[in-house]
Image (tube, grey):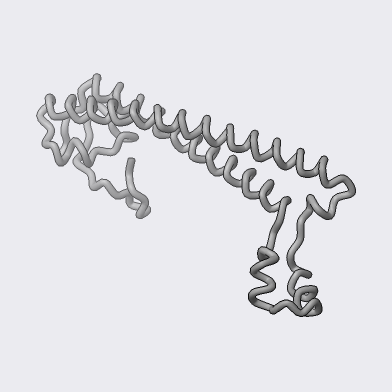
Amino acid sequence: MSRAVPEQARRLAAELDLRLAHDAELATELNDAQRRLQLANDRLWSGLHPDGIAAIYGEHPAAVEVATAHNRSQVLDSPDPLRAVQQVHWTIHRAFISYQDAAERRRQLAAEIGELAGDLIATLLGAGWSEHDARAACVDDLAVSRTCARQSPWRTDGRERR
């Protein structure tokens, strides 16, 4: 079954499609900031906590030495540990600020996406679409087509449609 797509719905769908693409970019920014946080944290210490090593391997110095061979701290092993700690501190600080900034922008974007989706559904309902069809419509297709066949919310490649 093919339905007419009002011009307003096409504009809203195009805006929604742009916002969804921007959301994907922000998700990438969040992942990058999280990765930078993890890498900086790993410079401080990677491996088991010394207390955990003692609990697992006992207090015998030879056992602890063998167990700690796979544990390391780039900071403590550096020629200037104070400088290394300061560098890690500022790396963590910058990554955390980046993460907070991207998260806030994504939160604001989510509100915009919700409003646009509501407006799009209302426009399609006003054009005679059923609520089910309006909610299941593919934003990508609506943005470029004057008519739209009722589609499943699933793509043929198995990925969920936006």
Q: Is residue 112 left or right of residue 101?
A: left
Q: Does 84 sit left or right of 107 as displayed?
A: right
Q: Residue at x 55, y 36 (%)?
A: 99
The answer to whether 47 is drawn above or below residue 2 in the figure is below
Nearer to me, 1 or 118? 118
Quadrant (top left, top right, bottom left, bottom right) of the C terminus: top left
State whether residue 158 is above or below residue 56. above
Pick the front one: 5 or 44: 44
Image quadrant occupied by the N terminus: top left
The residue located at (34%, 26%) in the rendering is: 112
- x then y, percent, for residue 67: 74, 73
In this view of the protein, which residue sits in the foreground, 14 or 26? 26
151 horizontally vs 80: left or right = left
Identify which residue is drawn at 24% across, 20% down: 8
Residue 74, percent from left and from top: 79, 53
32 sits left or right of 43 in the view: left
